[in-house]
Image (cartoon, coloured by chain):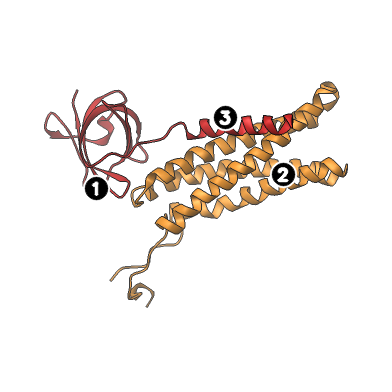
Chain colours: A orange, B red
Amino acid sequence: MNALPEFWRSEVFHPLSVHFPIALLFTALVFKCIALFYKRETFRLGGSILLLLGVIGSWVAIYTGNLADGIVARTLCDPTILKDHENFAYTTTWIFTVAVMLDLICYFFSQQLGTLALWVKRLTLILLLIGNGFLMYVGHLGATLVYQQAAGVYVPTEDCQEFE
Amino acid sequence: MKFFKTILFTFSLLFIVACGESTDVVESGTYQGKVKEVEVEKTEIYVTTDDNKTLELYFTEATKLTKNGETVDFSMLKENQKVEVTVEKTGNRLDPISVKIME
């Protein structure tokens, strides 16, 4: 009889950690867009905090993804999807990392930057837009790995004996 | 208009960069090439074949790693070593059956 595997397996930490940066980075973009029209500190500073937390979360997701990779890749029918997922995840995380750096520069050195600050803000927004496009694609690839190839998923036996 | 062109250009450029380090899928068989990268923690290697394809190989319990006819430990694998790999294609996954270190 098959024994039900332990839930807290290495590969489980990735799906547990990926949804935070997805939500945070998308909301950061929404806040920054609203801040273009409503000059309220809530949206400007709120967007920056969400972006920073999202980037930290992204690097955590990269770490947990690397933990899962070595285990999951051996069971997939098409690991090339996993490779694309990994490559795009790194690119996405670097896009947001650059965006957060520019945002921090703007926050702390806006006086010194003068008119250049406006261009840095525009560039940050462009990176957020592009980053969110990449983020959707990375999420889509991750979802296909789980729902089409059962990546990291325990598939119960037909008679469900391990649950008795 | 210029703003959207800039976004489109940057997006395309980043997309190309993101696609960069891809791997190839080949038919079951024996291939010779060089070890491009060794990932010890994942017992995984990348091999660049003589026809310039990159194979990503995750060792399984059944993978035989040999040098001069003798079974050797995974730690013997180093970058740029010449190897001969026999792989079995399952779906789009390449399972290494055997890896021979040639030098």
B51 to A162, vertically: above or below: above
Q: Are marks 1 and 3 on the same chain?
A: yes
Q: Kindly identify which residue carries mark 2.
A: A29
Question: Which amino acid type corresponds to the residue marked 1 in the rendered image?
Answer: Glu
Residue lying at 39% horizontally and 62% vertically, measured from the top left: A154
Residue A47 position within the rendered picture, expressed as x and y whole percent measured from the top left: 76, 43
Looking at the rendering, in which quadrant would you find the N terminus of chain A?
bottom left
Q: How many marks?
A: 3
Drawn side of residue A66 relative to residue A47, left or right: left
Q: Residue furthest front?
A: B1
Residue lying at 43% horizontally and 56% vertically, measured from the top left: A9
Question: Which amino acid type corresponds to the residue marked 3 in the rendered image?
Answer: Leu
Q: Residue furthest bottom?
A: A164
- Viewer-side label of 3, 2: 3
Residue lying at 58% horizontally and 38% vertically, measured from the top left: A92
Residue toward you, B91 or B97:
B91
Distance between mark 3 and mark 2 Cα atoms: 21 Å
Residue toward you, B50 or A59:
B50
Drawn side of residue A53 relative to residue A11, left or right: right
Distance between mark 1 and mark 3 Cα atoms: 41 Å
- Local packing at callout 2 (Cα closer than 10 Å; few below 14, some 14-19, many 20+) is many
Circle 2: element type: helix
Q: Kindly identify which residue carries mark 3.
A: B13
Task: Tell me which corner region of the image, top left, top right, bottom left or bottom right, holds residue A106.
Answer: top right
Residue A87 position within the rendered picture, expressed as x and y whole percent measured from the top left: 48, 37
- Mark 1 vs mark 3: which is more N-terminal? 3
Q: Kindly identify which residue carries mark 1.
A: B61
